[in-house]
Amino acid sequence: MANTRVDRVADQIHQIVARLIDTKLKDPRLGMVTVTDVRVTGDLQHASVFYTVMGSEEERRQSGHALESAKGMIRSAVGKQLGLRLTPSIEFLLDSLPESSRAMEDLLAAARQRDDDIRKRAEGAVPAGGENPYRSQFEDAEGEE
């Protein structure tokens, strides 16, 4: 059974952090950052914020540094807006979902290409054993008489 309070807090942190990144953070190192998911521990003491960055590896690295340097300001804003007794610590993690989904798409495209190649080779093919390569017991009995 899902803990609804933890889910609500995670959703609120997601919204707060996304809004802060969009409106308050003015760090020039920050690229096109999207908060993809937030996971909060059951005791509400730690929040892992997953994010993606559009762009090159260097832009991802620079955006990670910008988020790390703004972590204190983000945590303080989260604490004020959540109204919890203790503000959870925040950890920023680069989400690997886009890379893994891109790899999966590449694998699916390669499989489709192989299927098309096999389909093209099979167009004019004739079965090796004739029309019905498997003899039934009735054919065997008729052939022996």
Image (spheres, grey):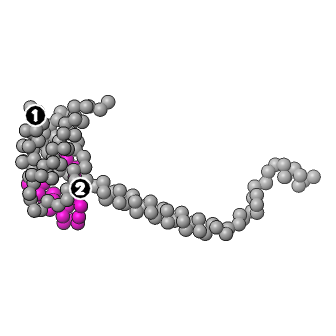
In the image, 89: left or right of 1? left
Horizontal and vertical percent position of residue 9: 19, 36
Say if residue 91 shows up in the picture. Answer: no
- Identify which residue, 135 or 52, lies in the foreground: 52
At numbered mark 2, what does the secondary structure look like: helix, strand or loop?
strand
Label annotation for residue 83: 1
Residue drawn at point x = 32 percent, y = 30 percent? 1
Residue segment shown in magenta = 48-69
Image point 24% across, 61% down: which residue? 54
Residue 52, label in figure: 2
Q: Measuring from the top left, give residue 13's x and y in whole percent.
A: 17, 42
Residue 4, picture quadrant = top left
The answer to whether the residues at label 1 and label 2 have Cβ atoms under 8 Å apart is no
* Dot 2 alpha-carbon crowd within 10 angstroms: few under 14, some 14 to 19, many 20 or more: many
Q: Which mark is residue 21?
A: none
Residue 76 vertical position relative to residue 128 in the rendered view, above or below: above
Instruction: Say which element carries label 1.
Output: loop
Residue 50 magenta-highlighted: yes
Whether the magenta-drawn stretch holds residue 113 is answered as: no
Say which residue appears at 18% left-offset and 66% top-offset. 58
Q: Residue at x 26, y 31 (%)?
A: 3
Say which quarter of the image contains residue 89.
top left
Residue 107: x percent and y percent?
42, 61
Q: Confirm whether residue 58 shows in the render.
A: yes
Q: 135 and 10: which one is in front?
A: 10
Q: Residue furthest right?
A: 145
- Relative to residue 37, is residue 103 drawn left or right? right
Taking 21 as reference, is 46 above or below it? above
| Amino acid, disc 2 | Thr
77 left or right, relative to 144? left
> What's the residue type where badge 1 is placed?
Gly
